[in-house]
Image (tube, rainbow, N blue to C red):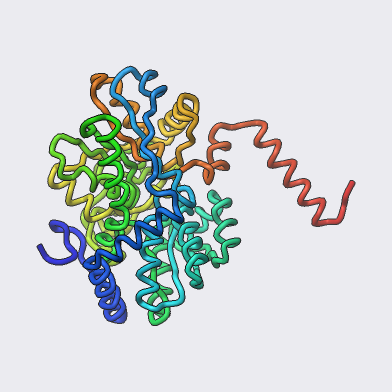
Amino acid sequence: MKKGYFGQWGGAFIPEVLYQTFAELNKAYETARADKGFWQQYVDLMANYSCRPTPLTFAENLSQHLGGAKIYIKREDLNHTGAHKANNVMGQGLLVKRMGKKRVIAETGAGQHGVATATMAARFGFDCTIYMGEEDVSRQRPNVFWMEKLGATVVPVTDGSKTLKDAINEAFRDWVTSMDTTHYVLGTVCGPHPFPEMVAWFQSIIGMEAHKQILAQHGRMPDRVYACVGGGSNAMGIFQGFLDEADVELIGVEAGGKGIDTDQHAARMVGDRAAPGVAQGYKTMFLQNSDGQMLDTHSIAAGLDYVGVSPILTDLADQGKVRFEAATDAEVLEALTMAMRTEGIIPALESAHAFVQAIKEAPKMRKDQAIIINMSGRGDKDIFTIAHAYNDPSWKEFIVARADEYRRQETGDRV
């Protein structure tokens, strides 16, 4: 297979000006991958800084409530910064140190990758700029606040749909003009080679841990593993632990938004709106029209509204190794409520997509079977979106009261 390709997908469609930068990155990555000491350095860093290994929690209450398979939850929400994103950025941070660069840039949608990158930059002493679609800045304000307090510059992107796709475009524009001193910390298993392979490598720590943990707790492999899919980094992370297990079914759950029969979703592998294309440096399935123009996307989860999907996952789907489903916004809120009420955990809206499909399928399975849900992140970041979706009156009163308080402070009126 040609380097950087997964079946017919992937590649590195990059401007000539970035050729030497990618050659340098490829060399650093290949050297690190061949160095067992580097991986151990990475594992030690994550153990001491980011709560790895994260637990595999037996969801006893949820399992009993649904009455079917035993449900286990891989707790990436307990990773430092609240999501799986730290795995990739800390690994890339070690590579940046090897390359001797002093500045990092990143794109972010849900903000978790942005917070993780800003955290990594603070930890290693790098300058940091985060590009984020203007719409995502608005709906993920808590994460924007923390990025800025960690020392990063957050740049709202006003082009296009003002979401993740546009943030990636802007980050690449920056990189073209600053490549000598800057590394682009791409956040998912997309983009030009070596990013899909490299990000998948760092995220594979999830699957390595889960493989050992399920054997220790359940005594054998799970029957199914569920993960949400935007770009696909958390899914690839856990799937890699079970790709060689023939009897384990892998299920990726995309953003069904308002329904895949509408134009308000981000399902690339489910439905008929996506087609093969080349954009943002690689070939995969993109949501696009007949002229090849990228379509607008929608999801209640800011991290799942990307227009493309990992070329690795696209190839795995071609091979029949991953099944794809889609969860609607309404289903996500129902699954979120069930997870909170039965287990006392608060999945991120992205992660709740995986819960939706697991909740649908677990009751139809035998009680001696087991499934794993990869909980890629926690829902703290989504409090504004969730409270609005629940139409919570006390939350509205709180926001109005706090806004009035700030307004009085700004005007000097203490009455």
**In the rendered image, the vertical position of residue 34 relative to residue 286, given as above or below:** below
Q: Nearer the viewer, residue 332 or 148?
A: 148
- Image side of residue 398 versus residue 346, left or right: right
- Image side of residue 152 versus residue 338, left or right: right
In the image, what residue occupies the spot 33% across and 36% down?
Answer: 373
**In the rendered image, the vertical position of residue 218 relative to residue 262, given as above or below:** above
- Whether residue 289 is visible here, answered yes or no, is no
- Number of dots carrying numbers: 0
In the image, what residue occupies the spot 30% across and 38% down?
Answer: 213
Q: Position of residue 414 (x, y in %)?
A: 88, 49
- Whether residue 260 is visible here, answered yes or no, is yes
In the image, what residue occupies the spot 42% across and 30% down?
Answer: 335
Q: Nearer the viewer, residue 26 or 208?
A: 208
- Image side of residue 299 versus residue 321, left or right: right
**In the rendered image, the vertical position of residue 216 relative to residue 62, given as above or below:** below
Q: Which quadrant of the rendered structure holds the N terminus?
A: bottom left
**Quarter of image, res 365:** top left
Q: Nearer the viewer, residue 62 or 19?
A: 62
Q: Position of residue 396 (x, y in %)?
A: 66, 37
- Image side of residue 241 versus residue 180, left or right: left
Q: Position of residue 97 (x, y in %)?
A: 39, 73
**Quarter of image, res 398:** top right
**Quarter of image, res 283:** bottom left
